[in-house]
């Protein structure tokens, strides 16, 4: 009888098997690591893309708001310019006219005739041709290097738009509350000086000031109208 010895493990096969399993594990780990890396990269790219999109949306929102704000500012500026132009046109619609008349006779000559006067009365007549009432109306007179206030004030209200039946025998009254107030319906206001000797009348001209319905102060001097501040000093 022949006895066959039991064969031991084939280490070559065992090592081959371990190598195969190890290669599979390594391959699997590499695949998992690669996938996770790809996922992290994709997530990072999505996050970056979302961030860029959010930033772009914020920029677009800011640009739209800036454009709207610019549009509102431009519209406000256009309205301001139009309003100021309208105010200036209304200010130039206030008519200012200088007048003068002889003063009292200078006595009686040797032939019994009155001597010509050597004095003059100056007056500035103001008519409001703007569509709005003006207030705080006042005037002074410039002569040479001096400036003098008016000494007499006459306000003439208009009765032209009041029918005869309503007026009857009533004339305009002196309204103290209307001092310095000139409506578009009034005839006008006249400021006068005392008698001034001719030698002092060197190129006289009036300076007239008032406040419009918006509270802006104006000055008319030598045909030019300009805005002034309240209580601004009177100058030649």
Image (cartoon, rainbow, N blue to C red):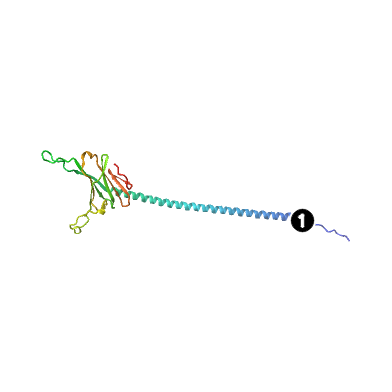
Kindly give the residue lying farthest to the bottom in the view shown: 1
Task: Tell me if residue 107 comes above or below residue 61 in the rendering.
Answer: above
Kindly give the residue lying farthest to the right in the view shown: 1
The N terminus, quarter of image: bottom right
x and y, in percent, of residue 227 in the image: 32, 46
Disc 1 is placed on an element classified as: helix
Task: Tell me if residue 165 comes above or below residue 111 in the rendering.
Answer: below
Mark 1 — residue? 14
Q: Residue at x 19, y 41 (%)?
A: 119
Frontmost residue, 63 versus 171: 171
Relative horizontal placement of residue 35, taking residue 68 as reference (left or right): right
Q: Residue at x 52, y 53 (%)?
A: 54
Q: Residue at x 49, y 53 (%)?
A: 58
The C terminus, quarter of image: top left
Frontmost residue, 57 versus 13: 57
Dot 1 alpha-carbon crowd within 10 angstroms: few under 14, some 14 to 19, many 20 or more: few
x and y, in percent, of residue 113 in the image: 12, 41
Q: Residue at x 63, y 55 (%)?
A: 36
x and y, in percent, of residue 104 in the image: 17, 43
Relative horizontal placement of residue 2, taking residue 29 as reference (left or right): right
Kindly give the residue lying farthest to the left in the view shown: 111
């Amino acid at each position: 009888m022949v006895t066959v010895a039991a064969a031991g493990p084939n280490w070559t096969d065992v090592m081959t098997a371990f190598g195969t399993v190890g290669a599979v594990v390594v391959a699997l780990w590499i695949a998992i690591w690669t996938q996770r890396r790809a996922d992290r990269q994709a997530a990072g790219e999505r996050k970056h893309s979302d961030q860029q999109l959010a930033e772009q949306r914020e920029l677009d929102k800011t640009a739209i708001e800036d454009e709207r704000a610019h549009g509102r500012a431009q519209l406000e500026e256009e309205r301001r310019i139009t309003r100021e132009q309208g105010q200036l046109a209304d200010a130039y619609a206030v008519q200012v006219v200088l007048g003068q008349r002889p003063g009292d006779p200078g006595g009686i000559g040797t032939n019994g005739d009155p001597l010509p006067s050597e004095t003059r009365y100056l007056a500035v007549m103001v008519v409001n041709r703007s569509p709005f009432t003006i207030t705080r109306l006042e005037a002074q007179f410039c002569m040479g290097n001096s400036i003098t206030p008016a000494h007499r004030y006459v306000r003439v209200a208009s009765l032209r738009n009041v029918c005869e039946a309503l007026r009857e025998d009533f004339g305009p009254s002196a309204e103290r509350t209307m001092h310095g107030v000139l409506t578009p319906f009034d005839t006008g206001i006249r400021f006068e000086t005392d008698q001034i000797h001719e030698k002092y009348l060197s190129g006289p001209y009036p300076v007239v000031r008032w406040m419009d319905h918006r509270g802006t102060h104006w000055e008319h001097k030598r045909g030019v109208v300009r805005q002034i501040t309240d209580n601004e000093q009177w100058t030649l």
